[in-house]
Amino acid sequence: MPRLTRRDVLRSGLILSGSTLLPHAGWAQARALMQNAIDDQALPAVAPREKLLFDYGWRFMFGNAEDPSKDLNFGMGHNNFSKTGEFEFATAKFDDSKWREQRLPHDWAVELPFVWDDELQSHGYKPLGRKYPATSVGWYRRTFEVPASDQGKRISIQFDGAFRDALIFVNGCFIGRHDNGYTPFSFDLSDFLRYGEKNYIVVRMDATYNDGWFYEGAGIYRHVWMIKQDKLHLGQWESYVRTRMEGGAAVLDLGTVVNNHGAKSENASVRWTIRDRAGKTVATAQAAAQPVAVNGSATYTATARIAHPELWDLDSPTLYTATVTVETDGTARDAEEVSFGVRTVHFDADKGFFLNGKHVWIQGTCNHQDHAGVGSALPDRLQYYRMAVLKAMGSNAVRTSHNMPTPEWVEACDRMGMLMLCETRTMSATPEAIEALKIMIKRYRNSPGIFLWSMGNEEWELERWPMGVPIMDDMQRVSNELDPTRLCTAAVNGSYYSGISKVLEVEGFNYNLNSPDKYHQTHPKQPSIGTETASAISTRGVYRTDPLRNELSAYDTNQPGWGETAETWWQFYHARPWLSGGFAWTGLDYRGEPTPYGWPSISSQFGISDTCGFPKDTYYYYQSVWSNEPMLHVFPHWNFEGQEGQPISIWAYSNQDEVELLVNGKSLGVKKVPALSHVEWSVPYEPGFIEARARKNGKVVLTQRRATTGKPASIRLTADRTTINADGEDLAMVRVEALDAQGRAVPTAMDMIDFKVTGNGALIGVGNGDPNCHESDKGSKRSLFNGLAQVILQANKTPGQLVIEASTRGNSLKPATLTITTQQAPLRPEVA
Ligand code: GAL
């Protein structure tokens, strides 16, 4: 099937209808970048290589970490490692018909109930771990076919990431183990397959041990692929494209490795074809033939030039592709496409960070990888949605705290114009940690968005002790060898003088605003960056902190002892360009780490947006100081029934000169917006409306009203896109609200809404951003939390319509229906 591009879609008149998911400045541009990124599907495999999606057709059942009788008798009888091939559960003899059907990516932790056990607090109170053997092990099984014509090829299975400790069995044989929850892994299955017959694969995932101190999910939560190649093939993630500028031209330093798993020595050459976005060849290069011995490998390098490159930048993330082909006697034996951008990055110890020679403040957020409704198993499209939420805030960078990210999060940065600080999970020089670091750098070093590598987060012992120095030296050496174009940092919290900081190429500061000045004076040549800041806490739509309800007011006034408010950290960093800017903890809320309250809070309150990506008010502070688009945001809402006469604090964020506030039409005066801050009034509550007017050069340019609404009367459903691709993967992110009789959104509505989905797709998750809500993310109903809930709809592969109906019990609110068109789209090739 042809690959539809955005241009094709526009030409065909199938223009993707717009809607206002986030009705504020900045969203239109972010949405356009998101749409472009969605249209530019992941790079397909290049012939003769095949890359097949291995996500569909699996079955799943819970095992047991303690009781073998509930764990397929794993480890008992013949089900142990004494022979290569006697694992019966991975053969035709085994009946999995009672296992449930399960497509990937899948996170089973999100399906589990919440359990009040303080040991589970940081992971979001999901029953995983040694005390919960019945819910910590999951088995995945699938039957698949390999045609007889594949005999002689090299066939491997590639997992983009699975949590955690995977054991893989194929056709009764043990294939391998991988216990890192964040790095990709693959196994060569060629010798174990039955060509022209049915094959059986079983994966046992054991999430008993965790990696982090935050929700991590459980199961095969990223994509799985089958790769079919010639036995003479390019090494995995060996192809790199390093760019540097010479005059106005881009010089490309190219390299790759060819492996020979065949039975005879080969004389192989490598060819590179560089294409621009429109598919036009802009450069080529060739590396001469050389012998590649049996079971050996050979390294190839070349250079190419793009005479007039379009640079990759934050507003125009231009990407090029390099097709790398290995040939013998003019025949292509294996090939792959590598996406890259042409741009320069540079740190100056006095002036901060420069992209393409221009100073850029790092306006970043740290983020974990889970989202409402789906846990850590995010469909690709959700990565772009999350990125759009951050981009529309004026943010230009993300940090992948505290682990190697999923490929689609990196691609979202590259395609949407976001910088990335890419972090490895473990700061250490053990073989495992070094291997994980190598995988991360090789896998992502061609990404133009990545501007800096992070060697890890808050390893207090290594910060304090001299042993931090050789460990960091080892890590940075590995990083520099694999990628001489980027520097390394680490997120350092507290001890800056005796350990890793002595050798870090870029000093990373977490919190501790009393430290950078003195450190910079004593280390004037070392560049710096704010690796982690803020940890400000707030609950969306709440305007009075209430410890009895585990809720925090959304005014930017709350932070734990180690944190800072948004205004405090940004003002501090902005006064010190040498700090380069920094990364606020966090862009979106995540499960786990409920702070400052524990149970029944099950998710963090650090997010600038909630777990659905719905902005809290502080989002607009960042927008006022990070974005150039004129903006105004006044809060709170004006629904304070029962508090008549009591003082209410009214804040406004704006990047205009001054703001006037009116209450029920009466002006309370005009206030100048202080630099990097907000304006504020205290007003006795009286129902009616408040109105803010932002002025530039004395002229009103923006107004915003908050009116006292009536009670909820009807439901409104709005999708971020009402035409999506019928590719089995695309999503419509549906915002659910209650409106009063006059059609105004009720910001305090808490109604329970039932959903019914029919047509060509399914509901895959629900959420509402409430850190204290214990309703199921996998149910077909959700209560509104302060006026909002979210439903994630996924298209199937048949074009048509996807209809969602929303109602309340007894039709207390007028129901709503929304129809999403699912349009024909290219399907990714799959394993049969
Ligand atoms: C930091 C840590 C983060 C998170 C945060 C909460 O010290 O790096 O992972 O725990 O605190 O404030």
Image: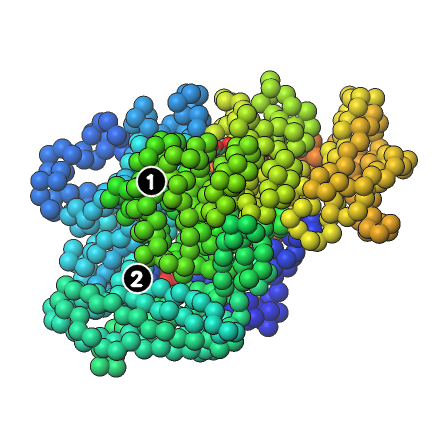
Residue at (30%, 62%) from the top-left corner?
A: 238
Specify whether residue 255 is in view. yes
Residue at (36%, 57%) from the top-left corner?
A: 483
User: Which numbered disc, 2 or 1, marks the residue closer to the eye?
Assistant: 1
Nearest to the observer: residue 493 or residue 6: 493
Residue count near mark 1 (Cα–Cα under 10 Å), binned few <14, some 14–19, many ≥20: many
Residue count near mark 2 (Cα–Cα under 10 Å), binned few <14, some 14–19, many ≥20: some
In this figure, which residue is indicated by the disc labeled 1?
469
Task: State which quadrant residue 691 falls in.
Answer: top right
Secondary element at tag 1: helix
Instruction: Give me the C-alpha separation between circle 2 and circle 1.
Output: 29 Å
Tell me if 159 is positioned left or right of 451 in this view: left
* 196 vs 710: above or below: below
In this figure, which residue is indicated by the disc labeled 2?
238
Residue 828 on image: x %, y %: 40, 62
Residue at (23%, 49%) from the top-left corner?
A: 201
Residue 543 on image: x %, y %: 69, 28
Residue 279 on image: x %, y %: 47, 75
Among numbered discs 2 and 1, the one appearing first in the sequence: 2
Outermost front residue: 522
Disc marking residue 40: none
Residue at (69%, 42%) from the top-left corner?
A: 676
Q: Which amino acid, mark 2?
A: Glu
Secondary element at tag 2: loop
Q: Name the quadrant of the N terminus.
A: bottom left
Tell me if 720 is positioned left or right of 471 in this view: right
